[in-house]
């Protein structure tokens, strides 16, 4: 996968790939929660958007260098994840999904009115700055390299988390919460930690995205963005490691090519949702992994 | 002009009226959701789209077939309910043996499709729907002006909500429904056709949404987006009221509508978010919802 992203910018437009990588990181973060934790969060856009606004504001209004802005924004998303996690963890399954959705709407309406977000206009012309004071991120190549490093770091973190004792306990909780509880694991704490980690990585994706596109807007906090990340993960394969990346690539490509058709993007996303849920539940990577008899 | 808490009574009662109307829509929609969830254990994300379909079919009936409001009230809910039955029979039934989240995802996808199709056809701006002649105008009650149609909306939704509650809680059919919610296999063993009951229940819930849509058409503009943002507030209402409780969703719907109306008077900036804030508070204090059963 690293090889693909290293070689691809020679062929494909780099900004498009950067968009794909940001969404892939977002989807990986989301998959951590649902694929391995079994918790469907329908409000993940709030982390993407919060970090996006925080990074844009820090870089533009406070003039911070990009790496500090991204770190600050990720911290903001983590804080939001902690607060919302404490509220949402109290319920399971469907209630958890609806709670996260409603919390995300609350954040959306706040950002709609808050003066620093400039509402519908969003925060525009965010400076890309100089990374570590040395590397001018205005050049797409430098930006691409930075995004690639961030993406690989985030992905590696997800990979390590999943294949660690913490990840195993998460899977145990997903399979049978009562049994995990009876074995002595503090289930709420594990779920909260997973939620926090997922929120932080989603924030990292959002912060990077707003620096890349030099824009932070309301679409990043709208619930349709939450729906998109669910779609990406579902299409790629819930609970697989590479699934979210593949799903994100497919959806971003599809959006790019269908953009002229307006409402058809929404309709085709809905159709993919329906088909995936009814017949294609393992997702692209899941089906491949199933065929190869190897967990991917 | 008299004032209460520094707010003129006209404004206060005007906003309370709007709050009651919003509340009646919240109550109708959350009632449909609660009924569907109670029996099928599926969150019907398509509810907002079906509400929108109800309004649109009323509009189409008015513009293409010349059928007025009262005809729409009769025709539209069964028609949309029938589409709901088709959805349930061919798609939702396959998902019952899986994790309930897949039902949520399926209905979310269906909502995207339906909204996208209507947006493709009718664009995003709202379409007008004229109020029925018998209900236009209003009465001056002294402390406020009460439009007839608004009063009709509140009265009709109260009647429908309480009627549904009565059927579910106090009749034999309702007792079959409630038994099937708790133990479908056993109820089926007694000879009651549970799958058909489930299908019809889903159709009924969808018909409720369409009914709300037809009633909404004269007040709110008929647009493909009308269900989308409303449904999330209704979700919050249902979470606050308690997912399985019929009476809970009715009371919470009306109550939260009033609270939202009051917030608009005293602190307008928070009016969009107040329901979600209440939801967060309720979840911290009483996770099962105000009327929900503690599990």
Image (spheres, rainbow, N blue to C red):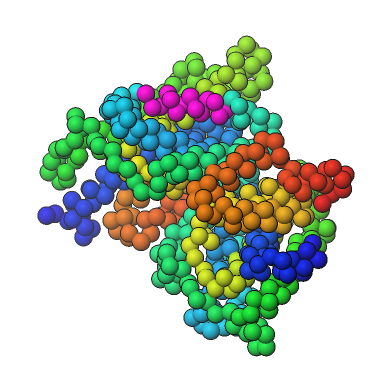
* Visible residue check, residue A78: no
Magenta span: chief secondary structure: helix
Q: Quadrant of the C terminus of chain B?
A: top right
Quadrant in the picture for residue A278:
top right
Q: Is residue B141 left or right of residue B41?
A: left
Q: Quadrant of residue B38?
A: top right
Position in image of residue A108 (x %, y %) = 47, 59
Which residue is located at x 55 percent, y 33 percent? B37
Q: Which is more toward the observer, B219 or A198?
A: B219
- Regarding residue A279, the answer to whether it shows in the image is yes
Q: Is residue B79 magenta?
A: yes
Q: Residue at x 56, y 29 (%)?
A: B87
The part of the chain drawn in magenta is B75-88
Residue at x 87% of width, y 45% of height: A292
Q: Is residue A118 above or below residue B33?
A: below
In front: B238, or A5?
A5
């Amino acid at each position: 996968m690293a090889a693909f992203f290293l070689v691809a910018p020679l062929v494909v437009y780099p900004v498009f790939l950067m968009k794909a990588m940001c969404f892939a990181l977002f989807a990986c973060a989301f998959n951590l929660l649902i694929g391995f934790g079994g918790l469907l969060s329908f409000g993940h856009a709030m982390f993407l958007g919060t970090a996006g606004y925080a990074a844009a504001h820090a870089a533009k209004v406070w003039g911070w260098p990009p790496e500090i802005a991204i770190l600050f924004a990720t911290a903001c998303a983590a804080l939001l994840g902690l607060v919302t996690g404490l509220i949402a963890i109290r319920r399971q399954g469907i209630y958890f999904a609806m709670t996260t959705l409603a919390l995300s709407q609350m954040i959306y309406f706040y950002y709609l009115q808050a003066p620093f977000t400039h509402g519908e206009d969003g925060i525009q012309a965010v400076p890309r700055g100089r990374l570590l004071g040395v590397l001018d991120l205005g050049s797409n190549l430098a930006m691409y390299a930075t995004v690639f490093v961030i993406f690989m770091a985030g992905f590696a973190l997800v990979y390590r988390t999943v294949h660690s004792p913490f990840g195993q306990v998460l899977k145990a909780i997903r399979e049978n919460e009562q049994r995990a509880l009876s074995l002595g694991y503090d289930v709420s704490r594990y779920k909260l930690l997973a939620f926090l980690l997922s929120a932080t990585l989603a924030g990292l994706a959002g912060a990077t995205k707003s620096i890349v596109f030099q824009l932070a807007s309301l679409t990043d906090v709208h619930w349709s963005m939450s729906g998109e990340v669910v779609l990406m993960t579902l299409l790629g394969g819930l609970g697989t490691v590479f699934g979210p990346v593949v799903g994100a690539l497919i959806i971003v490509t599809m959006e790019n090519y269908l953009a002229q058709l307006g409402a058809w993007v929404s309709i085709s996303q809905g159709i993919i949702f329906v088909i995936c849920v009814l017949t294609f539940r393992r997702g692209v990577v899941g089906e491949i992994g199933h065929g190869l008899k190897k967990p991917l | 002009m008299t004032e209460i808490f520094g707010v003129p009574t006209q404004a206060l009662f005007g906003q309370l009226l709007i709050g009651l109307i919003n509340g009646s829509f919240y109550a109708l929609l959350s009632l449909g959701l609660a009924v569907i969830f109670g029996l099928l254990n599926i969150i019907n994300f398509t509810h907002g789209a079906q509400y929108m379909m109800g309004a649109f079919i009323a509009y189409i009936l008015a513009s293409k077939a010349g059928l007025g409001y009262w005809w729409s009230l009769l025709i539209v809910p069964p028609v949309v309910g029938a589409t709901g039955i088709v959805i349930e029979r061919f798609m939702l039934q396959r998902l019952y043996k899986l994790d309930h989240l897949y039902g949520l995802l399926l209905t979310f996808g269906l909502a995207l499709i339906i909204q996208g199709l209507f947006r493709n056809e009718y664009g995003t701006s709202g379409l007008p729907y004229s109020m029925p002649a018998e209900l236009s105008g209003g009465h001056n009650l002294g402390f406020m002006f009460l439009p007839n149609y608004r009063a009709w909306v509140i009265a009709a939704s109260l009647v429908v909500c309480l009627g549904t509650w009565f059927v579910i809680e106090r009749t034999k059919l309702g007792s079959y429904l409630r038994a099937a919610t708790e133990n479908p296999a056993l109820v089926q063993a007694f000879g009651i056709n549970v799958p058909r009951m489930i299908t019809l229940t889903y159709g009924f819930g969808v018909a409720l949404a369409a009914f709300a849509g037809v009633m909404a058409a004269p007040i709110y503009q008929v647009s493909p987006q009308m269900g989308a943002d409303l449904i999330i507030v209704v979700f919050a209402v249902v979470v606050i009221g308690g997912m399985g409780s019929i009476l809970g969703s009715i009371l919470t719907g009306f109550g939260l509508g009033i609270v939202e109306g009051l917030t608009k008077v005293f602190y307008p900036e928070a009016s969009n978010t107040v329901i979600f804030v209440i939801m967060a508070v309720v979840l911290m204090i009483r996770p099962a919802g105000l009327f929900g059963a503690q599990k």
